[in-house]
Structures are given as structure tokens and as C-alpha cells.
Image (cartoon, grey):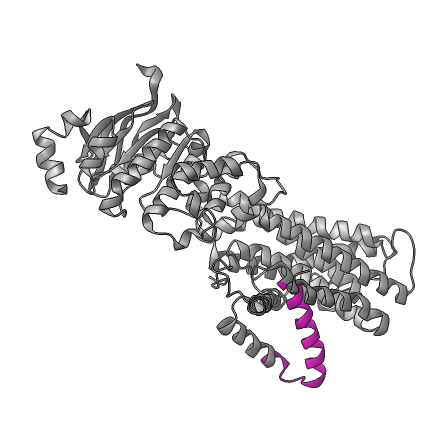
Amino acid sequence: MPLRFVLPLILLAVIALLPLGVPWAKVVLSLAMAKGLAVLGIVVLLRAGQVSFGHALFFAVAAYAAAFLGKAFAGGELVSMIFFGVSASLAVGLIVGLFVVRYRYIFFGMLNLAFSMILFSVLEKFYHLTGGSDGMQVARPSVLGIMLEREGFEILLFYATLVICIVIAWCVQRYLSSPIGHMMQTIKTNETRLEYLGVSARTTLLVGYLISAGLCGLGGVLMAVAQGIVTPDYAWWIRSGELVFIAILGGAGSVAGAFVGALIYEVVRTYAAAFAADVWQMVLGIFLLAIILYASRGLVGLYTDLMDRLQGRGASADAQPREALK
Amino acid sequence: MTADVLLEAKNISIHFGGVIAAENVDMQIHKGRNLAIIGPNGAGKTTFLNICTGYLKPDAGKVYFRRRDITEKSPRQITRMGVARAFQIPQLFSEHTVIQNMLIAAAAREKRWLSFARLEEIPERNEMMHLLELVNCAAIAERSVNKLPEGQRKLIDIAVALALKPQLLLMDEPTSGVASSEKFGVMDILTAALNEANVTSVFVEHDMGIVEKYADEVAVWASGAVQFRGPPAEILEHPDVIRDVIGEEV
């Protein structure tokens, strides 16, 4: 087996086994994976060279949809909450997407931001419906009709999330390497040629946008269930920024990077908030600067380069372009 | 006569401010007859290609492709109908390899929107490799298009257009940016590829040697109108053409 697959497999095994020895780790890891799914949504759009500063919108739509479903049906059921939440984010994704795919770059980013802030205000102000800034409780749902104790539910949620992440990561990787995934990438490099191949750049981007909205929605539902509460913060622009931050930290354009970035971000955040409460955001900021300046392909890029060097190859000539941010 | 007309422009006019790029131009492109458009810079040759591919809408007049009105159609729709385009500055997907550029075009032609196969594994791969062989680029199939010399980028730009299996190919200065020593070589490769693919071509060209050797017909575009049209030998000998067009170019 190639050397480069050893570390990822060890990492995966550690994540899968950690909750058995360290009980509190499962919630932190569940949250990190949920966020990783949302970051994956950002990664899909980054393929087309587009950055959304408002994708927390879909995160929140799905989370609130699941919360409302739970409230309406005495706690609700996990699988139906996931389906309902993701469907809601896809529906909103279609409406917003039809509008924003007409724009590119800063306009695309800012329009997304605007839509997410509209939802944020609605969630804050319609407090008789949404609980305002206090948010809504998400009671522990049953799983296919079975009501679990807290401990059992957290274990199940953790492993379910892990499996979902692995399956989704594989699917997104396949999508990105399929013809339409490559067409998505050409929106960044040459939209004119794409149109002159008889392909609609807007429709291509819309498909990617829907996938990214669905991924954010999936992350949102899992986060809501893991945390047991949804608040307007889910839609806040800082949350959107965080998703972009993690995507770049992990390696813009890389599926693995989304999860690696989310994992490291959550761990750093959890520990830094405890040990360096006042400066942890500064630490992250400096880290981001270092990544952009010295390793623009993120942590996954650093790892790939390291493996290339260990195996005696130079950085391959046709590696992913370094200007992932452009 | 009308049966073999592929593309027909009727009475098209277009102005850019005070500049007249086309004024009541009629133009017919016949199946199987490669047409060269020559003329001074700024005469409206590229504008004509832009109108034929839907990139620009004429102020007046109509464009028909196989007797269907395409004047109001988008480049995407016109491409789907069978008109492909190659560009003066090659329009390639810079983050992809040569073969990936071709495969994206093939996937677009076959509408593989729902294919979950890897791009490199779609069934058209052999066909695309064959096309690359036709334009003498099979050896560089796995290279990134960014790292190629301009002459090869031009050939790949045309190969990408041919990957669509068009009936008509519009080329904007296929040999510009190609070293003069290589121009005839590039055109030899191109003409062979076009013949094999059975594609009618229209090309804008400034090099009269190329026009003379490779065009079946020549149209002289000047002052927003087609001034002359006919076989190369006749047109290129015409005293007015020598004075107004060739004189400037040589």
C-alpha cells in the first residue's frame, strides 16, 4: 500500500476508536464532522472559483427545518429529520441558486451573504416562531422509532455521522472527477469555451450550488441534533466565514481537506477556548495567514508535498494550481 | 443551389458607434467548400464570426443555419446545432490536460450530465485520442495545456471544436501566433483533419500564401461589406484586392 494512504487510514481509525476510550470526544468529533460536511459544500463551489460568504444560510435552513419537525412530532425521528432538513436546504438552494448563479466572484459572494443575513434577521425577529436569539431546543429524536438513552444516542449519532461522512466524501469525490464535475471547474478557467461547447455554465453552476446547499444542510441537521439546540447564529455571517476559513485551512478544492480542516479547527477551538480564551481567534488568524502565504493548497497540500518528497518525486508538474483562491 | 447552403447571412448590418462592421451583408457558406475571409484589420471579419455564432446580435438582418433562423440564438444553442468555433486566442481549460480538454468537449457533445464515471474513463476516449493523432498532438495528450507552445495550443483549440463533430467550423486566424516556418505545417495537419472529419470550414486569414493554398473560395471583407468573392487564384490577382488588402498585409 502506498505510504501516503497510511496516515489517513490511521487518522480514520483513531477517530473511529477514540470515543470508546474518551467518551467526551464523540460530541466534539460529531460537531467537527458535521461542520466538515458543510465545508465540503464550500469546496464544491471553490472548484468553480466561486466563494460564498453566506452558505450558513443552508446550514441554518436545514437545522431549523429539523427543529420544527422535531417540535411538531414530539421529538421527531432522526432519519426523517435528516431528509426533511436536507430537502429544505435543497429547496431554498434552488430558489437562491437560480438567482445567484447569474453572478460571479465578489457579486456571487456578497449576494449569498445578503440572503443569509435576511434569514438571520428573520430567525432573530420572529421570536414567537423561532425563539429569537434564544433559538429552539432540539429534543433528542428517536431513531427509526427506537428511543435511545443519551449515551447510546450520542454513540449512534457519532458513528452514523462518521459513515455518512465517508459515503458523502466518496460521492463528492466521484462527482468532482465526473464530466460535469470537471465542467464545474471550467467555470473558473474558461466559461466562454464551456458555452461554445454547448454547455450552460449557469446550469452547471446551479447543479454544483444545489450539491453544496445540500451538503451544508446535511451538516446543519447533524449539528443541530448533536448540539440539541438551534440558534440564529447558525445563519450568521461569521458562521459562513468560518466555513470558508476551514475550506482554505484544509486545502481549498480538496475533499479530504474539508474534514481535516474541520477536525483541526474544532480541536484547536475547543482547547484554545479553554487555555487561551482571549487570544485563540488571533492564533487562528495567524495560522490562516501562514497557510495563504506559504501553503496555499492547505494542510492537504502540505501533506501531499511531504509524501511526494518522501517518495523521491519532486512536486508533480501538473499538480493542482496553487492559486486556489483566485 | 440552396440545398448545399450550410449557413446564410441575409442583409446583416451591425455598427459599433460610428464604425460600420457590416452593412447589408449577404453571405452564403456552401457545404464542402472551405471559405477564407480576408480583409484589412477592423473591417468586421471577426464580428461576422461573432454574429454567426450568436455572440453578437446584428442590428438588422438574419442568419440561417441549414435554413433555420439562428439570429436570436445563443452561442450554446448554435453550437448544439452543429456550428463549432475556434478562436484567435486559443480558448482552453487551463487547469486541465490536453486529453481532458478533449474529453470535456466529448462529454458535452454526448450530454453526459448524469455520468458518474470518471472523465478519463468515458467511452469517447479512444475517439478523442484519434482526433489528437489527426492534429499531431497525441504525444502531448497528458500534458497541461498551459505549458504548450502557441502553435500546439491553436491545434488543440481546433481539435476541441472538432470533438463536437460539427458540420461547420469557424476559425479566427488559425495560423496567427504560429511561427511562419510552421504555418504551412499547421495548415497541412488541419486540412487533413478537417477532411477526415468531413467538416466545412470558414477561416479568417491574413497570410495570402495560406489562403491561396488552402481555401476553395475567398471573400474579401472591407468597409463593412463583402467586396469580392471567388476562387483564390482569381481574387488574389484582382488589382483592387492587391492594392487594398494584400498591399497592406505584405
Predominant SS of the magenta segment: helix
- Image height of B215 relative to A57, above or below: above
Please state the horizontal and vertical placement of residue A33, each as a whole percent of the image.
Answer: 72, 63
Residue toward you, A125 or B7: B7
Please state the horizontal and vertical placement of residue A268, each as a whole percent of the image.
Answer: 67, 76
Residue toward you, A226 or A20: A20
Q: Residue furthest front?
A: A312
- Image height of A177 relative to A161, above or below: above
Q: Is residue B51 magenta?
A: no
Please state the horizontal and vertical placement of residue B224, each as a whole percent of the image.
Answer: 20, 34
* Residue B76 seen: yes
Quadrant in the picture for the N terminus of chain A: bottom right
The tally of labels here is: 0
What is the quadrant of residue B220 in the picture?
A: top left
Please state the horizontal and vertical placement of residue B89, each as a whole percent of the image.
Answer: 33, 47
From the viewer's perspective, tell me whether residue B68 is left or right of residue A60: left
* Residue A232 seen: no
Q: Is residue A260 magenta?
A: yes
Question: What residue lies at 54% left-to-right and 45% top-to-bottom?
Answer: A204
What is the quadrant of residue A12 in the picture?
A: bottom right
Give, as a single range, the part of the protein colored magenta.
A257-282
From the viewer's perspective, tell me whether residue A67 is left or right of residue A193: right
Question: What residue lies at 71% left-to-right and 80% top-to-bottom?
Answer: A271
- Image height of B75 relative to A53, above or below: above
Residue toward you, B68 or B59: B68
